Amino acid sequence: MHFKTIFKSLKNKDMLKKFLIIIGILFAYRFLAHIPLPLGEVTTFRDAVHNLINSSNFGSFINMISGGGLTNFSIILVGISPYITASIVMQLLSKAIPSLEEMSEDGEVGRKKINQWTRVLAVPLAVVQSIAYIYILNQNVLASATAITPDLTLLQWAIAIIAMVAGSIILMWLGELMTEQGIGNGMSTLILASIVSSLPQTLAALWSSLTDTSAGTLSLFGWLNLPVNPATFWITLGFIIAIVVVIYFLTKLNEAQRILTINYAKRVHGNSAYGDIRSILPLKLISAGVIPVIFATAFLSLPALIGQVIISKNADSALGQQLVAIFSAPNASNFSDLYPLGITWKWFIYPAVLFLLIVMFTYFYSSVNFNTKEIADNLQKQGGFIEGVRPGLQTADHLGKIVKRLNLFGSLSLGFVAMLPFITDYIFIVVQGSPAGLSLSGTGLLLIVTISLENLRALDSRALMVTYDDYGKETKTKKQKRFKKRKTAELEAE
């Protein structure tokens, strides 16, 4: 990364304007996250929804994707998840329907049509998700709230659905405005802002706990007392070290790729010859990105959600209680309720199933997203080939074997990242009898690292374009200085 070039590019008015537009859109996004949904009394909802988030993995997942929209009970509760779902559906359909596949390969015009259909598909998905969320909250939250009656009127349903769908459409529009600035993907940036938005509250709570010296102060070698809580200090220090190690591992994991050398045959056309060159074909270790983790988490949250709906209808239902106990992610908030006798075999079901689902979704999405036959055909049309491999079907088979091996290690690595919260919780359960309040969020860190690296690359490319002339002048000046210095040294030597 050329960080010096990035800072220098901000002197350009157009670059500075794009940068300020993105910052302004992020402020608007955070402002929308605090506009309450027109449905009942806000304070009562926030207290009730907070209990739902602590007891439900589904609620925690929604809250993370919506940037705290569930906690604040805001109009962006649905977030951009309908657009993400619509994008994935269109990708799958473009591989299954030949006409859509031709349109996706039809250049910019075809991609614009598919993007337009994606936006249209996102609207009914937003309506369906809004109805589902309101129903869930009505069964789990509104029925116990004193601010409104449990039975919602048709007008209340209509207003709430319209507000949530409008919030989702506004987020789609803001994301596309950010993408148009050419500094990263707007939708990914909104997801990043959603995750990072909870950091100030976490840091404030951590600082409050760190400066609480009611249990004593930290003594360093008997000659210096720091006004911090000793236990919190060592936990925080270990937590910071673990985060640094995990971020380094995730960065390497995200950047890892297998480089294949592509040779192009020499061709003679008239009096000119071209070809006889070498190129590379990079194959990423995790071509599916973080999508398998998101899919697995969302898919695994459905049984617990069904169990909560059953319990809301019948509190004594054994089926509902078993579904919630088995398919709720074990954490510090629900451990004492779900496992009063400590760790049992049920504690390991959720992590094990989550790990298997991540591996399955990684293979599935990679097979859809990376078409080896299509790549082999394109190489053959362009006269390219892999050394020692015949063009055509053998090249496709060779690429398929390499991708399967990469998917094996990549899926296991993604599964390990998703297991980090459960590993740390298990260690704390064995040591102190209960999970840690500070668990590593592997999914959140993976999203942060992946999106940050993509945005930095886009920002670096845009900065190089803006400062290209200045960069060329500086390079020329440096060469001239080195040439003069070398000539001066030669003359002095003579």
Image (cartoon, rainbow, N blue to C red):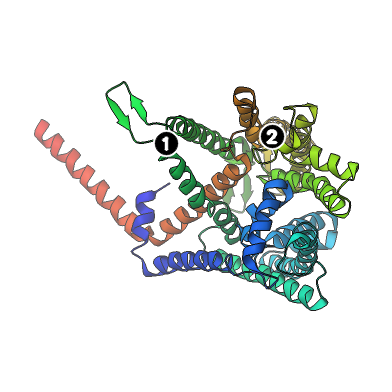
Q: Secondary structure at mark 2?
A: helix
Q: Is residue 229 in view?
A: yes
Q: Which mark is residue 191?
A: none
Q: Which of the two residues, 83 or 7, is positioned nearer the viewer here? A: 83
Question: Measuring 70% from the left and 29% from the top, which residue is drawn there?
Answer: 388
- Horizontally, residue 231 falls left or right of residue 303, namely left
Q: Which quadrant is home to the C terminus?
A: top left
Which residue type carries mark 1?
A: Ser
Residue 94 position by quadrant = bottom right
Which residue shows up at 57% across the image and 66% down it? 34
| Percent of width and height locating residue 461 | 47, 55
Front one among 397 and 183:
183
Could you tell me if residue 370 is visible in this image? no
Residue identified by numbered label 1: 214
User: Does 232 sit above or below residue 473?
Assistant: above
| Residue at position x 52%, y 67% in the image | 25
Q: For label 2, count other residues whose C-alpha is less than 10 Å away and answer few (under 14), some (14-19) or many (20+).
A: many
Which x, y percent locates residue 323? 84, 42
Can you tell which of label 1 and label 2 is closer to the viewer?
Answer: 1
C-alpha separation, residue under disc 1 versus residue under disc 2: 40 Å
Residue bearing the label numbered 2: 415
Q: Position of residue 376 (x, y in %)?
A: 74, 43
What amino acid type is highlighted by mark number 2?
A: Gly
Task: Find numbered disc 1 in the image and state the secondary structure of the residue it sits on.
Answer: loop
Q: Residue at x 77, y 67 (%)?
A: 121
Dot 1 surroundings within 10 Å: few (below 14), some, or many (20 or more)?
few
